[in-house]
Amino acid sequence: MAGAFGYTLAIVAAALALRRVPIELSRWRMRRRSRLLSDGSGDDESPGARATSPQDRQGEPQAGRVGGRLRRRFRRALEDAAVPCGESQAVAVWGAAVGVGIVGGLVLASAPGAVAGAGAGLAGPPAALWSARHRRQRLVVEALPDFLERVARSLRAGVSTGTALEEVVPATGPLGEDLARVLADVRAGSPLPAALDRWRSRRPLPEVNLAAAALSIGASTGGRRAPAVDGVAATLRGTRATQREIASLAQQGRLSGLLIALLPLCFLGLSAMIDSGSVVALYGTPVGMVCLVAGGVLNIVALVWMQRITRLP
C-alpha cells in the first residue's frame, strides 16, 4: 500500500510539473522573440509563417527539403487546429509528454511500461492535432453570425462595405486573421469582391461562401445591403443551432464509447499501482504480451467504431 501511495505522489508531482511547462516555454519564447526583434529579424517559427521561396530552396540538399516539407506539414497542422503556439513550443510540449510517459511507465510497470509510456507520449500529441484538424474552420463558422450582424449595423449607419469590415473586423481569432488578409488585399488595390473571392478559395466552406456572396453583392450592386447581410447572419445562426442540437444528441454515445475504451486502461493502471504482481503475467510472459497487444488493438478498433457510428455528417 505504501508503494501505491508513492506511485500516486509521483504521478501528481509529474502532473504539477507538466502544468508549468507551457508557462515557462511561453516566457522563453517571448524572450527569444524580443532578441530576434532587437536584431532586426522576425520569428519564422510562428504558425502563420510562410514557406521559403523556390529560389531559396534550390541549393538545399534532399534531407533539407524533406525536413522543410515536414515542418510545413507540422505548421499547417498547428494552423488547422488553431493551436496558439509556435513550432518550437509545440515540439517542447511534445517532448515533455514523452518524458512524462516514460517516467509514469517506469513507475507503473518498469521497462515495458516505459516503452508503452514513450509510445503514448509520441502518439498522443499527433493524435490530438489530427482530431482537432477542423477546429480553425469551426471557429470561423461560429464567429460569422455575430460578425455579420455587426457589419449590418455599420451598413445601416450609411458606411461602405469596406469601411464596415474595417470597423468590425475581430482583433483576434481565425476569422480575424482571414478578414485581415481580405482587408490587406483591398488596401493593396484589389476590389473588395475579388478579395472576398480569394477568401472563399482559401476557406472553402459553405458558410464562408454564403457570407462572402452577401458582402460582394452589397459592395458591387448597392441597394439594401444591411437586410441581406442580416438575413445571412440569421440563416447561419439557425444552422449552427441545429448542428449544436444534433451534436448534443450524439454526445452521449461518443462519451459512452470513450468511457468503455478507457475503463480497461484505468483498471490495468490501478491493478499495477495496488499490486504489481497481479499484472506481471501480462508483460512477463509471451502469452500475456499477446493478450495485452490483442486487447489494446481491439480496444482501439472499438473506440474508432463507436466514434464513426456517432460521427456527425
Image (spheres, rainbow, N blue to C red):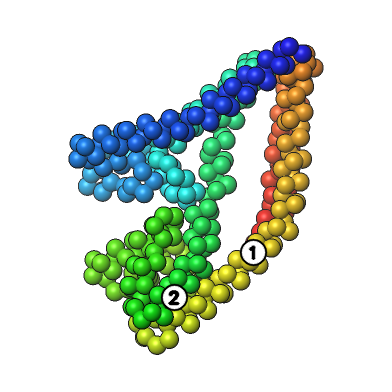
Q: Amino acid at mark 1?
A: Gln
User: How packed is label 2: few (under 14 Cα within 10 Å), some, or many (20 or more)?
Assistant: some
Q: Residue furthest front?
A: 157
Q: Residue at x 30, y 41 (%)?
A: 43
Q: Residue furthest top?
A: 2
Is disc 2 placed on a helix, strand or loop?
helix
- Residue 79 percent across, percent down from the top left: 44, 49
Which quarter of the figure has residue 215? bottom left
Which quarter of the figure has residue 32? top left
Q: Residue at x 28, y 46 (%)?
A: 52
* Residue 234 to residue 168: above or below: below
Q: Residue furthest bottom?
A: 223
Identify the disc placed on residue 153: 2
Q: Which residue is mark 1?
A: 243
User: Is any atom of residue 95 visible in this view?
Assistant: yes
User: Is any atom of residue 288 visible in this view?
Assistant: no
Q: Which comes before the other along the chain, label 2 or label 1?
A: 2
Q: Residue at x 32, y 65 (%)?
A: 183
Is disc 1 placed on a helix, strand or loop?
helix
Q: Residue furthest right?
A: 278
Q: Residue at x 44, y 60 (%)?
A: 175
Name the quarter where the C terminus is drawn: bottom right
Along the line of sight, the residue nearer the viewer: 51 or 139: 139
* Residue 9 to residue 86: above or below: above
